Amino acid sequence: MLTFLFGLYWLVQLKRQFLLSAFVLVLAFVFFNPIYEFSSPKNENDYSNKLSVMSYNVRLFNAYEQGTDNEENIKKFTESIINSDADVICIQEYFRDFNVELPGYPYVYIHYRRDKFKMGQAIYSKYPLINKGAFDFAGTQNNTLYVDVVVKGDTVRLYNLHLKSMSIKPSVNSLQDADKAMLLERLGNAFTKQEEQVHSIIAHSKKAKHPFIYAGDFNNTAFSYVYRKLREGNKDAFLEQGNGLGTTFRFDSYPMRIDYIMTSEGLDVVDFETFEQTFSDHHPIKATIGW
């Protein structure tokens, strides 16, 4: 992620340092993890149970976007979510004031860090949710929700993740104009917080009594430490059944994949979809999981 950001900066500056950043990205592409997925063989196995999970950072349902109508915003978001026909919806940056209702999703878990805090996370489900809980990350506004989803008598643990953001404006101009020392400090702090958060999530999921799913906004790329740690021993649904770039966020016009769904051992990815239409700065993603 850091290499990508500074690569953009040096590209704008037309300096030779960009070549170094580009070279590192090429090495990352070859040796670490693909950023482009060619069409995967379709999983046509027969499973006793299937569960489709959507992850969507809704950016507070655009509540603070100038010139937008809140009722219309909610209508667009809810229609797009319902039309996805996912069994479970993991929402990041949920907005307390809107109290969104999704017909067909009777089981809901919403968590805010504090009583008066506007932003939270939510899980909507067609299936019963039990053993619900959350852990808030120190020094940030982020947290992770976890629930056990009961599917036809069987149980799967689900984590809704929202990791620490980079706290920078998603534009090349903002990088060009930023104080470089302050930018480095901000990015370094974000990386440190993300690592701490990921270690907490992994430690918690290791104690899970059931196979588990990670879904959410990791706020980092597939080249990052946090991605690699969360993927250890797990499957990235996009790499299993996705295709193309799988773009979920754009840094200006540069495509990035920072939202993920991962599955633990015992769960297979049957299908994966990245939705082109979005009313947020993130694209929603959906994975169908079988076991």
Image (cartoon, rainbow, N blue to C red):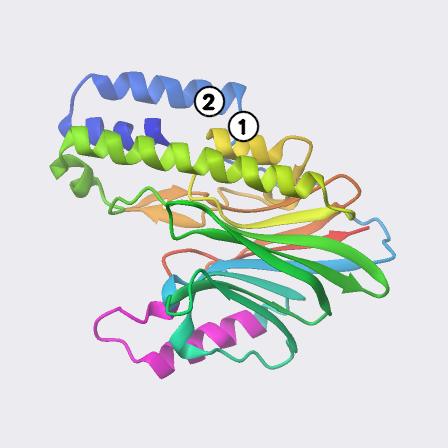
Where's the N terminus, which quadrant?
Answer: top left
Q: Quadrant of residue 113?
A: bottom left
First-in-chain label (2 vs 1): 2
Q: Is residue 91 left or right of residue 65?
A: right
Q: Is residue 14 above or below residue 125?
A: above
Q: Is residue 172 above or below residue 150?
A: above
Residue found 17% across the figure and 42% down from its top: 174
Q: Position of residue 182 (x, y in %)?
A: 18, 33
In the picture of the structure, the residue carrying the numbered disc 1 is 33
The answer to whether the residue labelled 2 contacts the one labelled 1, judged by CB atoms less than 8 Å apart, is yes
- Whether residue 111 is visible here, answered yes or no, is yes
Task: Identify the magenta region.
Answer: 61-82
Q: Position of residue 70 (x, y in %)?
A: 33, 79
Q: Position of residue 276 (x, y in %)?
A: 46, 58
Q: Is residue 81 left or right of residue 267?
A: left
Q: Position of residue 159 (x, y in %)?
A: 61, 52
| Three-letter amino acid code of the residue under disc 2 | Ala
Q: Quadrant of residue 104?
A: bottom right
| Three-letter amino acid code of the residue under disc 1 | Asn
